[in-house]
Image (tube, rainbow, N blue to C red):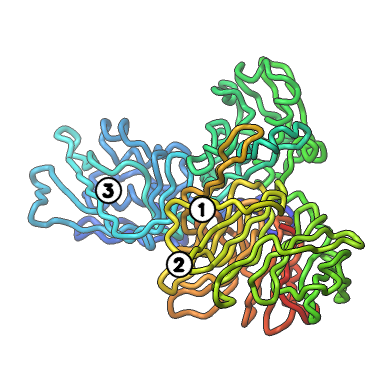
Amino acid sequence: MGADREGSGRRPARAVTYAVCGVVLLAGCASMPDSGDLRGVDSTPRQDPQVRVFAMPPREDAPPTEIVQGFLEALTSNDPQYETARKYLTGEAAETWRPERSTTVLAGGPGTETDHSGNREEANDYSVTLTGTRVATVDAQQSYTPAEGEYREAVHLTRDGKNRQWRIDVLPQGVIMGKSDFQRTYMSVNKYFFASNTSPATQAVTSRQPAAVADPVYVRRLVDPMTQVVRSLFSGPTRLLGPVVRSSFPTGTALAKNSDPLTPDDHNKLTVPLNDRAAGVGRDTCDEMAAQLLFTVQSLTPVVDEVELRAGGKQVCSLTEDRAETVATRGSAHRPDYLYFVDDRDRLVRIAAGSKGTRAEPVPGALGEGAVGLRSVAVSRDEHSAAAIGLDNKSLYVGSLVTGGSLGEPVLVSKGKTEPDRLTPPSWDAQGDLWIADRDPADPRLLLLREGAGEPVEVRTPGLDGRVQAVRVAADGVRIALIVEKDGKRSLLIGRIERDGKAGEQSAVTVLELRSATPELEEVTAMSWAGDSRLVVVGRERGGVQQIGYVQVDGSTPEASVPAALTGVKEIAATEDETLPLVAYSEDLIVRLPSGLQWQKVTEGTAPVYPG
């Protein structure tokens, strides 16, 4: 499974085991060459993710070419501690090699270059260079980052003077493999923390539940992934989210010594034995710890419906899935009431979310009465208010969705001279604040209106290179997605939201560490959050045609089915609740995509949105 589940169904894990010579030969075994140049280790064509692959140790008197080949193949096996791979190394190299430090992903399998002039097998000395094109790197925190450029790293072998066996004595730290092997060997899982990035005013409201924030990491798919991700949760958030989230686990919390691999029982209950660091926590803190664990393991198989925490041989607390919703809010657990869009009379209308109906009704209040013609809209997550842009993209209005509600004067007016140089569609965050960008070339700005009112606050965006064309804030309130245009290219960037200030003071808001989530796309035209760490994107590659697909916030591609093709898509709407259909504006129609079906016409209209 990817970090965000496709739909709500879960299915039992299936494991098919193959014993192979290395990992390249899945259908049978063949001997390794006794001599000749090294060849690239081709990335295995993508197989069933549940296939288990085992590597073979080096054979007696294997030449250096075979040693390097066998080592690279062993890196893609399911060996938990890389014990077989270490057999290709000298004793000292095996002790100092740290495979957990990083995983480098190449477009194909790693290639090799041999320096024939410098190699002297008779002198017990042999060198090669590993080569390839970088695709991504997974760091020591298990965080994925897209990468590009050439990969070149030296490997040196020596022959033991006593047993005359070749072994690798110099090699790069970490693991290297091709993209296909990475997809087979690793899986993305969300670990969860709580947002600490709230405004002072919000922090004063002690009754508000903390927002759960998904932090995607990559774990090895068939090496006890549940235990892996729980240990990763204890280690804390990745660097990108560290400044804006907190963990309820006391510093130093770990699994109890000699504990068994984590597996739920027949009643889908997971018991997690902890060390003494967690023994003295209070009930509320323990409930938050259990919620973090439950949210984290629920994207894995087998199913987990309840988590029990134990420390010092005693139960500390237990939390079921239903009660976890009272401990913390999670975007994917919130189901909106309605889908909203602008009808052919330029009014804000709505249809029950997830319904099969096609008959829309105007929303209560002025925005549904047509007092002002609308171009685009955003509805607050509690569905009590809405923000709307007038037909000329110049004015921003905010109104309540209650019968008899008035609209009043616009809360923001752009000075841009043309419609494309004025306001973007707005977006509401989980705290009830409204985000929007003014595209005026003379003064381009990202703006925040607290609770949708008052004087707009300019959001600081250090490092932003380009002009914002679209804004969507995640349900967790600590991440923001921006479509940014530069030199005719539109990219999707994900950044971290930080708020600074003391209680009772106006806090400054900054978006930091913007990074591309779609490095392979040249033109991103529309996007929407479609999970706790996933977005749906409309765009095209260089020289390609428009396509719809999913991306993770870290820039990786989730294991989700690709939406059915649809031409002429101008806008896309999704929600963190993945059971609800995608909705799009295409060819002057509102269309939706129920799970497993084709796109269906809803009605005429534009600007479809779910709350947010």
The disc at residue 67 is 3
Q: Secondary structure at mark 2?
A: loop
| Pointer 1 residue | 554
Q: How many marks?
A: 3
Give the quadrant of residue 312: top right
Q: How far across and how far down the image is residue 313, in percent?
A: 69, 16
In the rendered image, the quadrant that contains the C terminus is bottom right
Give residue 602's quadrant in the image.
Answer: bottom right
Residue 304 placement, left or right of 440: right
Note whether 475 is above or below 488 in the view shown.
above
Which of pointers 2 and 3 indicates the residue nearer the eye? 2
Could you give the CA–CA distance between mark 2 and mark 3, rounded to whole angstroms?
35 Å
From the viewer's perspective, is residue 266 above or below residue 475?
above
Q: Secondary structure at mark 1?
A: loop
Tell me the residue that label 2 is attached to. Answer: 520
Label 1 and label 3: CA atoms lie apart by 35 Å
The amino acid marked with disc number 1 is Asp
Locate residue 288, reporting x and y percent.
70, 31
Residue 260, given in percent of the width and then of the height, sits at 61, 28
What whole-number distance in Å separates the C-alpha atoms at marks 1 and 2?
Answer: 13 Å
At a point 69% along the width and 76% down the height, the residue shown is 391
